[in-house]
Each structure stands twice: as C-alpha cells, then as structure tokens.
Image: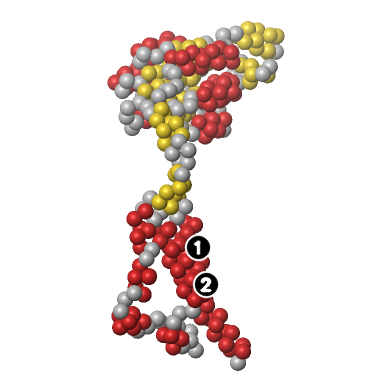
Amino acid sequence: MFEFAWWWALFALPLPFLVRLLPAKKQQQLAALKVPNLPQGISTSKQKSGTPKSKLFLATLAWIALVLAAARPQWLGDPVSIPAEGRDLMLAVDLSGSMKMEDMEVRGQQVHRLSMIKHVMQDFIARRVGDRIGLILFADTAYLQTPLTYDRETVNQLLDETVIGLVGEQTAIGDAIGLAVKRFKQKDESNRVLILLTDGQNTAGNITPEQAKELAIAEQITVYTIGVGADKMLMRSFFGTRQINPSQELDEDMLSDLAQSTGGKYFRARNTEALQEIYATLDKLEPVERDSRQMRPLQALFHIPLAVSLLLSVILAFIPLIQLLSRKLKA
C-alpha cells in the first residue's frame, strides 16, 4: 500500500502558479532581485522577455518532485505477526577448562562437552520464535556475549564462535547468575528464564551461588540448571585401560538447590540424546508465547523524488553555461 505520511504538504504544489498570478508590478519587484555569481557574458535581458518553455518545464518538474519528497511517500508492506508479550530467555554456558573433556559423542564422533552443547543448542535456539534470547559465557568471570534479542541467528553464530578458556579455566557460576539478574532487571513485564549449563562446581567469582540464588528469587527469575558430563569413560594409560568418572567434580546438590529454589528444575545431560530430551522438556515447561499482534513493515521512498528534483536543478543550473559556450563556439 502506497501513502503519503505528510499528505498536507501537497497543498504547496500550486504555489509557483499563484506567484505568477501576482500583479505585474509585484512580479517586476521580484524579478529585480539580483542573482549573485552569474557567469560573465550572461545577460538578464532575455529573462525579462520571458522564460523558455524548456526551462519552465524542467523547473515545474523539479518543484513537483520536491513537494512529493516533502510529503514523505512511503510503502506499507503486508501485515506481519509479532509476539504481543515476549519471553526473556538467557543462556549461560560454561567455558572452563573442564569443558575440554571429550566424553561426548556427536554423529558418531567423540567430541568435547562444549561441541556437544553447541550442536544441540542450535536447534533449541532456532525453535524459540518470539522469545528474546541472550547469551552469557563464564569461566573465571562472567560476561555478556549477546544481549537479549530476537535475532536468533546472531545468537547461534556467536555461540558457535566461542572457544574453551576464553575467560579462564575456573568456574564462576554465581557471577553468571548475578549477571543474568542484572540484565533481567533492565527488562520489565517479561517471563524471566535462565538456563545454566555447567560441568563443575563454583570455584571462582565475586558472588557465591547462595547469594546469586537469593538475587534470582528476589527478581522472580526461574533458573533451569543442566549438569553436563558422562558418568563413565574409558581412559587409556601406560598401564592399560581403566574406567573413570569424568563428572566427579559436578556439584549436583548445588545445581539442584538453585533450580528448585527459583521454581525451575535440574537436569542431567550425560550424552547428546539426554540433552536433546532436556531441551524438548524445556519447550514444554516454557512454551513459546503464541499470542501475537500485527505490524506492517514501512519503507520510506522520499529519496526518489528528492533525487529527481536535485538532478533537474543541476540541469537547470548548467543550461546558461551551455548556452554561453554554444554562442562562443558559433562566434
């Protein structure tokens, strides 16, 4: 649909015609105004006798184009449904050194824990249509990688670019929750959900998990915690192969208390399939908002008539110079 935002500006179209209807004496007074910097050799005597039709035509087109630009033409696209009330979903991902443990399997290949999280989380993020998603990365400290946004592709891309050890080797779980609380406080009227993935226990940071839990409760933030890591793993050494527990440092009691105290739930991801099931469960516990309202994309078009008016004005400005050069060549 095409429309003019300032349609009343179109009333200026007849102004030049009204000026020409002024009494002859008044027109002479207006014509007596001198134009500075006229090229030498250009006489104004011809202008008194009348304006050439070609100049008048170009000037009229330039004026019409200028008025059309001032009326702000714009194109309204088809209605698009957007969520009426979104959900704020923050993802906190552990980047500590222990995430290098290659006890996970993706498509038949042995990978470390972060690679498995990236693989499964991409589909989860893609399904969160209508939710604002943010990304927090933490190790020795926590920092915001992506603020809350509807741009799910960017969140997925930045998650895919993360590397282990980017912010240290330890695990600051309390700082990650505290940073999420801080970001949620800046957003009103939303369902605040934090999904925290870690494979260890709190070993760094300025805020303890207990303090962070109290902050989350005070701000009514639901925390879902996910403990990542296998229970059994075969380790080869000089003395042969032995079975170990690569997740022995995982503090499940602390993660479970964090989730239950805030109205969330603790999950255990021992493999890729388990993490996929956890995300499917989260889709049910925190369904995507279905209510929506409509908006129409708007595209401004004023630059088109404005460019036409400018081009015609340039042509009008160069016509006297072209006429002067033509007379000199004939002479």
What residue do we see at 35% from left, 26% from top? Answer: 190
Question: Separation of disc 2 and disc 1 at Cα?
Answer: 11 Å
Seen in the image, is 276 located left or right of residue 8? right
- Identify residue for label 2: 315
Residue 178 visible, this orientation: no
Instruction: Identify the amino acid type marked 2.
Output: Ile
Secondary structure beneath dot 1 equals helix
Disc with the residue nearer the chain's start (2 vs 1): 1
- Identify residue for label 1: 308
Q: How many marks?
A: 2
Quarter of image, res 133: top left
Q: Nearer the viewer, residue 302 or 214?
A: 302
Dot 1 surroundings within 10 Å: few (below 14), some, or many (20 or more)? some
Q: Nearer the viewer, residue 288 or 6?
A: 6
Instruction: Identify the amino acid type marked 1.
Output: Val
The spot of residue 297 in percent (x, y) is: 45, 41
What residue do we see at 70% from left, 9% from top? Answer: 240
What residue do we see at 44% from left, 12% from top? Answer: 266
Label of residue 221 in the image: none
What residue do we see at 40% from left, 24% from top? Answer: 291
